[in-house]
Amino acid sequence: MSALASSMNIAVSALLSQSAAVSNISNNLANSSTTGYKCTTASFATMVSGSGSYSNFTGAGVTVDPSQSLLTQGTLVGTESSTDLGIDGNGFFVVADSANSDIFYYTRAGDFSTDDDGYLVNSSGWYLQGYPTDRDGNITSSTSASGLEAINVNDYSGAASATTEMSIQATLPAEAEVGDAFTVDAEIYDSLGVAHTVTFTYTKTAANEWTVGAALADTTEAASLTLSSTAITFDTDGTLLTPTDAITVAVTGWTSGAADSSIAYDVGTVGTTDGLSQYASSDSGDDPAISVDEITQDGVIYGEFTSVDIDEDGTVYANFDNGISYAIYKVPLATFANANGLEAKTGTVWAASIESGAANLTEADSGSTGAIMSGELESSTTDTATEFSSLIVAQQAYSAASEIISTVSDMYDTLIAAKR
């Protein structure tokens, strides 16, 4: 009787285990298109009721233990959104369930987009965390978990860039008389993106010698403009002789309230004609005139925010419609001593546990942490062919266990009939 009862219990454990395996397979197949999903494997183990050698081994059935291999790399698939992020390596994105939460979780699901409040949130509602930076990409907070904050792009509605460098490529007329003056208007921008016109005046003082002066064309502008040097000389072949360094154009007291400007005016390379030069006017029949070929400067007018880009090292750049782009955040990646020990919160979000160890926050694109791939998503690691094959095996095992129960039932009936 005890052997029959044991056989029945063993068969029941098989039915339960294979049912769990089928449930596991069903979940894998259901998530075959889920971004960042890690396939779960059902691992079976025998249970033992006795001890000793295999000659007197007594079985007690089977148990099943589902497990996920979180470090299995899913295929990275390209998308059309720069905020879709995939990880090529072993790291995890740090996320939180609200914009102000300091309790962090970890995911590989990088399908982030900007919500109505400007936060980068994935399709499951998890907020991407990052370190705030200055415009050069240097982190301005602690690099521990306490320095993380939910990434928000609404704080960067617009940007301007002041002129810091400029050049004028022009030819001064060699036939000009001493005292003759020629002007060139050049546009510059202050730190608030306001455009201003500076009039440069070139006056001939002697053979091959000139002076340069500058003034703001807007006579209502109260700012003060000064030049660090004014003398310009040319060699007998018309190429620049002095100055050897750029002339500093300093503007203080902008009426707009912008920061003071310091502009390096590059007059050209000594011995060349890539800036200012001195030759006869192109048409000797006309009065002497300056010939301007090109005026360049690096300032830009105020521009509106358009989008963000994320580099492989996790640097988040804000882009503006005036061409300006600068760093605003750095996205770290988390690694663990035992990533498979993470505690599952949802199918694609995990929490740190005693088994996984604490998160180690590191810069992306370093070591095995992995690079952040913008415009790509990590697909599910479920392989449908493998799952269907496992489903057939589980179905056959379940049927076999059912046959055992049916057989043991018949044996019970036979035993009961014999006692009658």
Image: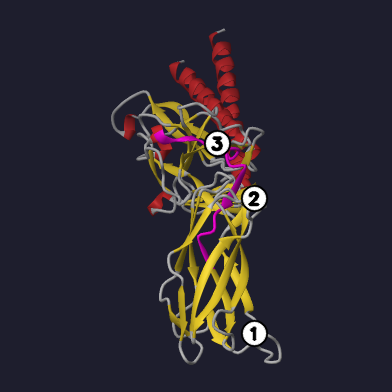
Question: Residue 383 location, x and y as percent?
Answer: 60, 47
| Distance between the alpha carbons at the discs numbered 1 and 3 | 75 Å
Using the image, tell me which numbered label, if any, was put on residue 60: none
Q: Is residue 113 left or right of residue 373?
A: right
Magenta highlight range: 147-166
Q: Is residue 156 magenta?
A: yes
Nearest to the observer: residue 271 or residue 230: 230
Residue 142 shows in this picture: yes
Q: Which residue is mark 1?
A: 288
Classed neighbour count for the residue bearing mark 2: other residues with Cα under 10 Å, few (<14), some (14–19), many (≥20):
some
Picture residue at 37% right of the left edge, 37% below the top: 142
Q: Which residue is mark 3?
A: 348
Question: Residue 256 location, x and y as percent?
Answer: 59, 45
Picture residue at 30% right of the left edge, 26% below the top: 51
Q: Which residue is mark 2?
A: 303
Q: Amino acid at mark 2?
A: Gly
Mark 3, secondary structure of its residue: loop
Question: Residue 170 location, x and y as percent?
Answer: 59, 78
